[in-house]
Image (cartoon, rainbow, N blue to C red):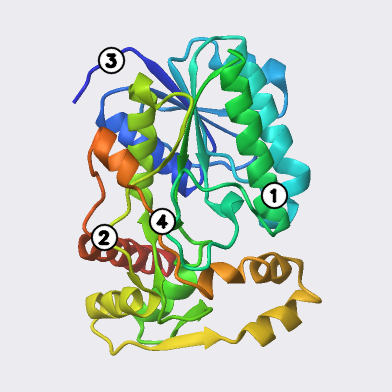
Amino acid sequence: MIHSEELHVVFGSGPIGSAVMSELLTRGYKVRIVNRHMKINVPEGVALVQGDATDPAFTRDVCKDATVVYDCTNPPYTQWPELFPPLQAGIVEGVASTGVKLVSMENVYMYGPTHGKPLTEELPYAATTRKGRVRAHMAEDLLAAHRSGKVRVAIGRASDFFGPNAFVSSAGERVFLPALSGKASQVVGNANLPHTYTYVPDIGKGLVILGERDEALGQAWHLPSAQTVTTRQFIEMIFAETGYPARIQAVPNLILKTLALFNPTMREVAEMLYEFDEPFIVDSSRFEHTFGNHATPLQEAIHTTVEWFRKYEHDKVK
């Protein structure tokens, strides 16, 4: 463990921000976590600051004595075009005035459909969805800010995630919670296709590594994931942990698209269905060759996640 007086600032207290916080504490760094609305419990010694990350004056103040800043913000799924770019812009302006490193968390929406071709960092941005186009523009803006000398940026990208605190995800509560009682896990798309799932604590570790290593700057990196299996195999591993026979309920695309006509959240889910109707394999070999493979073995990650959801359910009924 490093025992350091370095301060690391984390914007966002969702599952990814929390994982970054935990990894930083494990490494002995001082941590300040920033959010806007959520009142969360943080470990002793962690400073929690509430404020508006779109306000450059606020972000300058909260980042001024930091060594590394992590952008793990994630606005409501239905409001990405309106809310996401201003969040990033406010953080960039705050960091630019301090000269500290910025590590930004992204997903892989900007690449668009690849028709089964593995996703690598060299792929062009060819998004066909509105959220993918938002992600593409934000990534381009970040890398342009780095090239201009405005900020020192490293970007980490991950696939659909699962793990502690990860409720809203294609491998979140609708998959893990039903499995605890032997009910069917709900999935979209073709469960028999390979699909990369990334463990949330591995994302946290990967982002912190990017913050520690200067050779990460100016580039986007796919964060390590365990071996890619089919969604069906992934769920069967979950049920093996819960002790029940595997049950999968695939929501037909037609039903999702019909719901999307009336439900804004379903509309956002429906436009990303291509990820589950073709092989979706995220290649993290460039990160692994440069920084090492830090992915938790898949069965171990699933075991820990099942135990976390089991404890969550137990505590909820107390």
Residue assigned mark 2: 304
Q: CA distance from mark 3 to mark 4?
A: 34 Å
Which of the 4 image quarters holds residue 265?
bottom right
Q: In the drawing, what numbered circle is on residue 133?
A: 1
> From mark 2 to mark 3, how far is it between C-alphas?
29 Å
Q: Along the polypeptide, which appears first: circle 1 or circle 4?
A: 1
Instruction: Locate residue 198 relative to residue 155 in the image: left or right.
Output: left
Q: Position of residue 125 (x, y in %)?
A: 61, 47
Residue 270 vs 92, above or below: the answer is below
Amino acid at pointer 1:
Arg
Residue type, mark 3 in image = Ser
Percent position of residue 226, x then y: 28, 57
Q: Residue 143, percent across and down?
A: 58, 28
201 and 151: which one is in front? 151
For the residues marked 2 and 4, what is the alpha-carbon distance in whole angstroms? Answer: 22 Å
Disc on res. 282: 4
Q: Residues within 10 Å of mark 3 (few under 14, many from 20)?
A: few
**Answer yes or no: do the residues labelled 1 and 4 have beta carbons within 8 Å?**
no
